[in-house]
């Protein structure tokens, strides 16, 4: 079996993420479903903090919304939050992840075991690095197309 990947065609270039159903099967299933439905297409990265992470996945671009699907139960795991880690954003409630996710620019080990890691960037990290910074960025970078390959 080949590894399943998620390709994000960003306004700054392509990013390939190795999906990790061994760590977070429910979250990988959700990301895969939303990508296949086109949910992430044309969605901006609304919170991009230099040296920390880039967050997207909210169709309103505000960071206050998600998909119409129910929130997910947390699947916290021991995978470290380091450069290229893909993890789910959530509210204070550990079981509130829905569609928003973030990609770490650098080590953020203080997030370990508190957020669900679901993948790792295997190519194109320079496209993540190139996303416009800000909360929100003045001219946010966006996901032009998200696609899953198996």
Image (cartoon, rainbow, N blue to C red):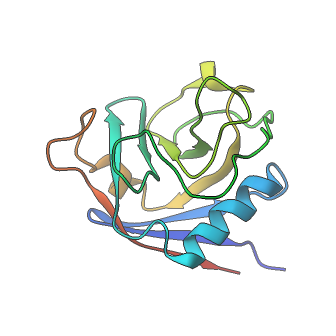
Residue 146: horizontal and vertical position, in percent? Answer: 48, 72
Residue 145: horizontal and vertical position, in percent? Answer: 41, 74
Residue 25: horizontal and vertical position, in percent? Answer: 82, 56
Indicate whether 95 appears above or below 4: above
Which residue shows up at 27% across the image and 65% down it? 11
Indicate whether 113 appears above or below 77: above
Q: Could one spot residue 12 in this view of the protein?
A: yes
Q: Check the image and name the residue furthest to the top.
A: 110
Res. 55 image quadrant: top left
Q: In the shown orientation, is residue 96 left or right of residue 59?
A: right
Res. 96 image quadrant: top right
Which residue shows up at 57% across the image and 52% down it? 99
Indicate whether 37 appears above or below 42: below
Residue 32: horizontal and vertical position, in percent? Answer: 66, 69
Pick the quarter of the image with the C terminus: bottom right
Res. 44 image quadrant: bottom left
Q: In the shown orientation, is residue 108 left or right of residue 131?
A: right
Q: Could one spot residue 19 in this view of the protein?
A: no
């Amino acid at each position: 079996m080949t590894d399943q990947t998620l390709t994000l065609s960003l306004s700054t270039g392509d990013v390939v993420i190795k999906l990790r159903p061994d760590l977070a099967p429910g979250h990988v299933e959700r990301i895969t479903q939303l990508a296949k439905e086109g949910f992430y297409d044309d969605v901006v990265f609304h919170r991009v903090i230099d040296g920390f992470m880039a967050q997207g996945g909210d169709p309103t671009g505000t960071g206050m919304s998600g998909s119409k699907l129910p929130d997910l139960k947390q699947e916290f795991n021991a995978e470290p939050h380091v450069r290229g880690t893909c993890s789910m954003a959530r509210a204070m409630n550990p079981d509130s992840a829905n569609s928003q996710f973030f990609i770490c620019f650098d080590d953020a080990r203080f997030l370990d075991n508190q957020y669900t890691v679901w993948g790792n960037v295997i190519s194109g990290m320079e496209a993540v690095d190139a996303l416009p910074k800000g909360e929100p960025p003045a001219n946010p970078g966006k996901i032009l197309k998200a696609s899953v390959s198996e």
